[in-house]
Amino acid sequence: MASFEQDRHQGRIYLSPPDVGSLELARVKEAFTENWIAPVGPHLDAFEREISDVLGGGIHAAALNSGTAALHLALLLSGVVPGDEVICSTFTFVAPANAIRYIGASPVFIDSEATTWNLDAALLAEVLKQRASKGNLPKAVVVVHLYGQSADLKPILQVCREHGVILIEDAAEALGSTYLSQPLGTVGDFGVFSFNGNKIITTSAGGMLVSRDAKAVDRARFLASQARDPASHYEHSEIGFNYRMSNVLAGIGRAQLDSLAEKVAKRRSLYLNYREALRDLPGIGFIPETGKDAPNRWLTCITIDSVIAGIDTEVLRVALEARNIESRPLWKPMHLQPLFADAKCYGGAISENLFLTGLCLPSGSSLAADEFDRVVTTIRGIWR
Ligand SMILES: *Cc1c(COP(=O)(O)O)cnc(C)c1O
């Protein structure tokens, strides 16, 4: 018991805290010095350019004030209108499903596949084929790359193209991940990133919409700035939004982007080190390696077969919390949420099981070696 008391007095270990330093501060100071505190400014344009560079040739980017705003605009640009149906991964954070509802459209959920934990490509193909034969294809598909792991995009893109359905990648958790050497967020028609405080890089809050379609990205900037028509006065002919990122926050984003590679490398090595340090524990599993992607390992996720392990994820989570270590269940599927009780879902067993058996471990890029050891020692102690 003495050691529990000791742990409680040690610093809290967070799941994925912001990892910022002096370069971020310098960029913010620059914005102050040059008096670019207004929403627009040179950091904003530069951040968009630098994100495009990171994602490779031909990608255009619009910096927004959240990933959710980027999802909303991606859906609008896809032509989604009230009454439409949009297919979405059920195993996700709520943002994409909410964005579909903002438009007055309905999400139709699809389960995960065991190999990627993300949208089941074969099930999607079946659903689109069936719907095509009945003439009720969805306007768009939102595929979510959870925890930085790629969905199996090749067959997903292929079946979307076959049926003329737009593909939106929710890569909010997946900046710096690739699928068959291509950056996530650049495979479909639109890609969405988030720079919320706990993501791979942060601007405290922020997001980015990317696409190869320069016109669509221009229109995203227009819609994100209250849809102001060209005129010396304020002229408006359609509904716009206040969704633009501020120049100050773009400065933080630029500094964060400078160390993206290091941040990804750190999280990937944490994942490998967790695997190595915990793999002999009976009943433990890890977010799978697909062989097709180089995931950023935003969060290291484990699963527990409680029959074999003798403990379940909630026991482990509470015991970690008692030692001042934050962990979190995997995302609760949308078809289990009261908010979406009426929504249709194809399948569901895989994501339900992941929710019941999975836990995210502290994975921040600033996690120190002694903190990592404390997490591992604690987990091993609890297992016994
Ligand atoms: C964080 C997140 C979002 C939303 O991003 P915000 O910037 O917080 O609005 C969307 N989708 C997923 C999967 C996320 O994890």
Image (cartoon, grey):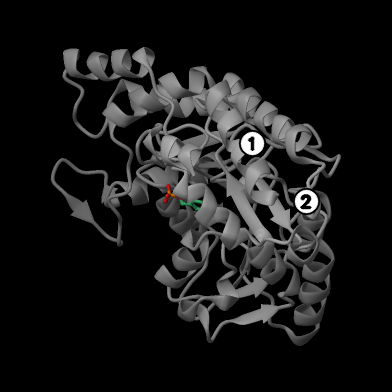
Q: Return the x and y of residue 264 as percentages of the image width and height.
A: 62, 27
Q: Which residue is mark 1?
A: 376
Residue nearest the viewer, comparing 7 with 277:
7
- Say which of marks 2 and 1 sits in front: 1
**In which image quadrant can residue 254 be found?**
top left
Q: Nearer the viewer, residue 330 or 235?
A: 330
Up-down: is 274 above or below 327? above
In the picture, the disc for residue 285 is 2
Q: Identity of the amino acid at label 2?
A: Gly
Q: Answer with mark 2 or mark 1, whichever residue precedes in sequence.
A: 2
- In the picture, measured across the screen, residue 162 lies left or right of residue 170, that is right
Q: Residue furthest front?
A: 2
Q: How many marks?
A: 2
Point 21% across, 23% down: residue: 36
In this view, the residue in front, 23 or 229, is 23
Q: Is residue 14 visible?
A: no
- x, y percent for residue 258: 50, 17
* Residue at x 60% of width, y 69% of height: 333
Q: Dot 1, how many residues are within 10 Å of its Cα: few (below 14), some (14-19), or many (20+)?
A: some
Q: Return the x and y of residue 218 as percentages of the image width and height.
A: 44, 41
Q: Horizontal and vertical percent for residue 210?
A: 54, 41
Answer left or right for 37 relative to 189: left
Q: Is residue 181 visible?
A: yes
Snapshot quadrant of residue 292? top right
- Kindly identify the amino acid type of the residue bearing the numbered disc 1: Val
